[in-house]
Image (cartoon, helix red, strand yellow):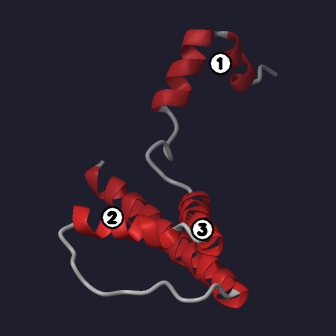
């Protein structure tokens, strides 16, 4: 018996068209993958912030960034706390994961409606 999939794979053009046009899930985004990607990005950004606070570079950066955004307010960078640092990174990751998961769900829903 002839295996249709193997025949399609041998014919490179047909294989390309099948993969491109025949895949019903072509517009779908994996919710978990996008959640992990955005969560990791948010977590890394906040981990860098934690390092800046830990080494004492956070205040000069804030003093530079606030005026760029037309913000003039009194603030203080508190003493570094490892517990707060870990909590910040974990919550940033979780917030990014949930945001990515929801975004992928909306994308998947909308892509079904557009077809």
Q: On the image, which quarter does residue 75 sit in? A: bottom left
| x 62%, y 11%: residue | 12
The one of 110 and 67 positioned closer to us in this rendering: 67
Q: In the rendered image of this protein, does residue 114 appear above or below residue 10?
A: below
Asked whether the viewer can see residue 102, the reply is no
Real-space CA distance between mark 3 and mark 2, rounded to the nearest whole angstrom: 20 Å
Q: Residue 46, percent across and down?
A: 56, 69
The one of 92 and 2 positioned closer to us in this rendering: 92
Q: Which residue has dot 3 on it? A: 43
Disc 3 secondary structure class: helix
Q: On the image, which quarter does residue 105 sit in? A: bottom left
* Of the two numbered discs 1 and 3 in the rendering, the one whose residue sits closer to the viewer: 3
Query: Few, some or many C-alpha atoms within 10 Å of disc 3 (few <14, some 14-19, many ≥20)?
Result: many
Q: Which residue has dot 2 on it? A: 65
Marking on residue 8: 1
Query: Few, some or many C-alpha atoms within 10 Å of disc 2 (few <14, some 14-19, many ≥20)?
Result: few
* Of the two numbered discs 3 and 2 in the rendering, the one whose residue sits closer to the viewer: 2
Q: Is residue 68 left or right of residue 86?
A: left
State yes or no: discs 3 and 2 in contact (Cβ < 8 Å).
no
| x 24%, y 67%: residue | 67
Residue projecting furthest to the right = 1
Asked whether the viewer can see residue 63, the reply is yes
Real-space CA distance between mark 1 and mark 3, rounded to the nearest whole angstrom: 43 Å
Disc 2 secondary structure class: helix
| x 56%, y 70%: residue | 97
Q: Which is nearer the N-term, disc 1 or disc 3?
A: 1
Q: Residue 41, percent across and down?
A: 56, 59
**Where does the N terminus fall, quadrant-wise?**
top right
Q: Is residue 35 left or right of residue 6?
A: left
Q: Which is nearer the N-term, disc 3 or disc 2?
A: 3
Q: Which is nearer the N-term, disc 1 or disc 2?
A: 1
């Amino acid at each position: 018996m002839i295996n249709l999939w193997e025949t399609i794979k041998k014919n490179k053009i047909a294989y390309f068209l099948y993969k491109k046009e025949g895949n019903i899930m072509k517009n779908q985004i994996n919710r978990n993958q996008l959640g992990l990607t955005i969560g990791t990005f948010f977590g890394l950004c906040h981990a860098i912030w934690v390092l800046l606070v830990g080494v004492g570079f956070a205040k000069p950066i804030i003093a530079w960034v606030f005026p760029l955004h037309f913000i003039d307010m009194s603030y203080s960078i508190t003493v570094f706390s490892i517990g707060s640092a870990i909590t910040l990174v974990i919550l940033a990751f979780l917030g990014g994961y949930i945001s990515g998961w929801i975004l992928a769900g909306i994308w998947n829903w909308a892509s079904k409606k557009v077809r």
